[in-house]
Amino acid sequence: MEQQTENNSIWSNLKKLYALKPVRCNTLILCTTWSTGAFTFYFVEFYTKFVPTQNIYLLQIIIGCADIVSSATLSIMLTKVRAKTSLLYILSTMAVASLTLYLSVGLTGYADFERGVDHIDLGLSLIFAGLVFVIRIFAHNLVSLSYYLNTSLTPPLLLSSVFALTNITCRSATILVPFVAELVSNPSILVTVNSTLTLIAVMFLKTDTRKL
């Protein structure tokens, strides 16, 4: 009996979510920000081969520092500009950085990319590493900001349903990462495409939907 009541509640919330057009549209947009952020965050790990170090511990320290920088920059950003504007800044930076990485790796030749950092000039390797960490920092920002927007834009009664939907799309995106990375040569262009499409979608995000 309790299980049936719970199931009815879930379906009832989903129906309410679908009936409220602004909330429905926001949820679809947030699904794209979640999936783009998660996809990019895990995807960029395949580019850490360009970081000029063979010490895995040092690499993890550098990655940890990048995540700290990410949290700090997001906190500062949200005190200066609105969340929607922050989203636009983050996605624009990801699109530009990933496109720069794609073009830089392409200009050096796919063979060098395939063999990794040992066969690439140190200067180029540092440029690649810098771009990789910029993308990672802003992908981390995107996921964190998407979580914040879930709570700040969604009516409280529908919050659990929105989190369920965004988490499903987020997990689906992370599952695709290793397959895409193996199938596409120099795949950072996919981050550019995803970021650009998400940027366009975010322009239609409504910021006055929490009290509907």
Image (spheres, rainbow, N blue to C red):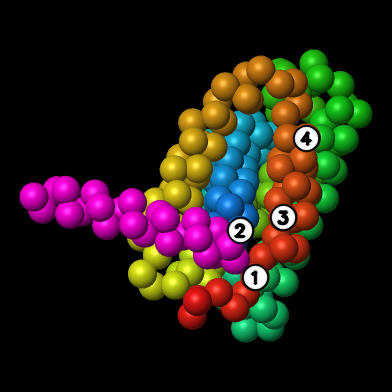
Residue 201, label in figure: 3
Magenta span main SS: helix
Badge 3 density bin: few <14, some 14–19, many ≥20, Cα 10 Å = some
Q: Position of residue 196 (x, y in %)?
A: 78, 48
Compared with residue 17, is residue 35 higher up or lower down, i.e. above or below? Answer: above
The residue positioned farthest toward the bottom in the image shown = 79
Residue type, mark 3 in image:
Ala
Task: Work out how far the residue at label 1 is from the one at label 3, CA to CA, in angstroms.
Answer: 11 Å
Task: Work out how far the residue at label 2 is from the one at label 1, CA to CA, in angstroms.
Answer: 8 Å
Residue 114, label in figure: none
- From the viewer's perspective, is the residue at label 4 or at label 1 nearer? 1
Q: Residue at x 42, y 55 (%)?
A: 15
Q: Are marks 2 and 3 in contact (CB under 8 Å)?
A: no
Badge 1 density bin: few <14, some 14–19, many ≥20, Cα 10 Å = some
Q: Is 59 covered by the magenta stretch?
A: no
Residue type, mark 4 in image:
Ile
Q: Which residue is mark 1?
A: 206
Q: Are marks 1 and 3 in contact (CB under 8 Å)?
A: no
Residue 189, label in figure: 4
Q: Position of residue 13 (x, y in %)?
A: 36, 59
Badge 2 density bin: few <14, some 14–19, many ≥20, Cα 10 Å = some
Magenta range is 1-24
In depth, the one of 105 and 145 nearer the eye is 145
Q: Are marks 2 and 1 in contact (CB under 8 Å)?
A: yes
The residue positioned farthest toward the left in the image shown = 1
Q: Relative to residue 36, is residue 89 drawn left or right?
A: right
Residue 86: quarter of image: bottom right
Residue 25, label in figure: 2
**Residue 179 showing in the rendered view:** yes
Compared with residue 166, is residue 174 higher up or lower down, i.e. above or below? Answer: above
